[in-house]
Image: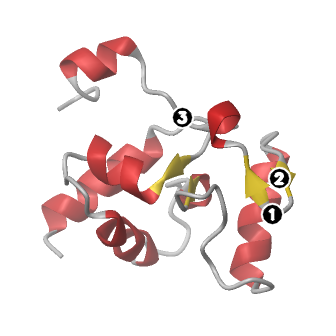
Amino acid sequence: MANDARDRIWRTVSRIPAGAVATYGQVAKEARLGRRARMVGRALRTLPNGSDVPWHRVVNARGEISLPAGSDSAREQRSRLEDEGVEFIGGRIDLDRFRWRPSLDELLWGPPGE
């Protein structure tokens, strides 16, 4: 994966506010990478230890955590989201309620600094 694409994904994920989530596909679209949802997952797996990119705010299109169920990483992701006020019902997040919606300025003019 090109560093430019990876960096755009990381910047996009960094814009997701606490208490909101985005899907892998939504992040790809916002990063201007089309339908490359899997690329988003690969980019998030390459985050350096200690990174402040809020990787935990990215979930799959069903509103579920995509990490292996019961894994330490999945428990950490759920815990971080719950600490931010995101609610799970039956293992899913209500995307109508918690999905990140970029501001009108971002939609019209693009992300800050781009």
Tell me the amino acid under the disc marked 3: Trp
Residue indicated by mark 1: 91
Residues at circles 2 and 1 in contact by the CB criterion of under 8 Å: yes
Q: What's the CA distance linking mark 2 and mark 1?
A: 5 Å
Residue sitting at 80 percent across and 73 percent down? 75
Tell me the amino acid under the disc marked 1: Gly
Quarter occupied by the C terminus: top left
Tell me the amino acid under the disc marked 2: Phe
Viewed as shown, does residue 48 lie left or right of 111? right
Q: Secondary structure at mark 3?
A: loop
Quarter occupied by the N terminus: bottom left
Colouring style: secondary structure
Q: How many marks?
A: 3
Residue sitting at 64 percent across and 55 percent down? 63
N-terminal of the two: label 3 or label 2? 2
Q: 83 or 49: which is nearer to us?
A: 83
Residue indicated by mark 2: 88
Name the front one of labels 3 and 1. 1
Tell me which corner region of the image, top left, top right, bottom left or bottom right, holds residue 44.
bottom left
Residue sitting at 31 percent across and 21 percent down? 106
Q: Secondary structure at mark 2?
A: strand
Q: Is residue 109 above or below residue 77?
A: above
Q: What's the CA distance linking mark 3 and mark 2?
A: 16 Å
Residue indicated by mark 3: 100
N-terminal of the two: label 3 or label 1? 1
List x then y, in percent, for residue 77: 71, 65
Q: What's the CA distance linking mark 3 and mark 1?
A: 19 Å
Residue sitting at 28 percent across and 26 percent down? 112
Mark 1, Cα crowd under 10 Å, few <14 / some 14-19 / many 20+, is few
Q: Secondary structure at mark 1?
A: loop
Viewed as shown, does residue 26 lie left or right of 82? left
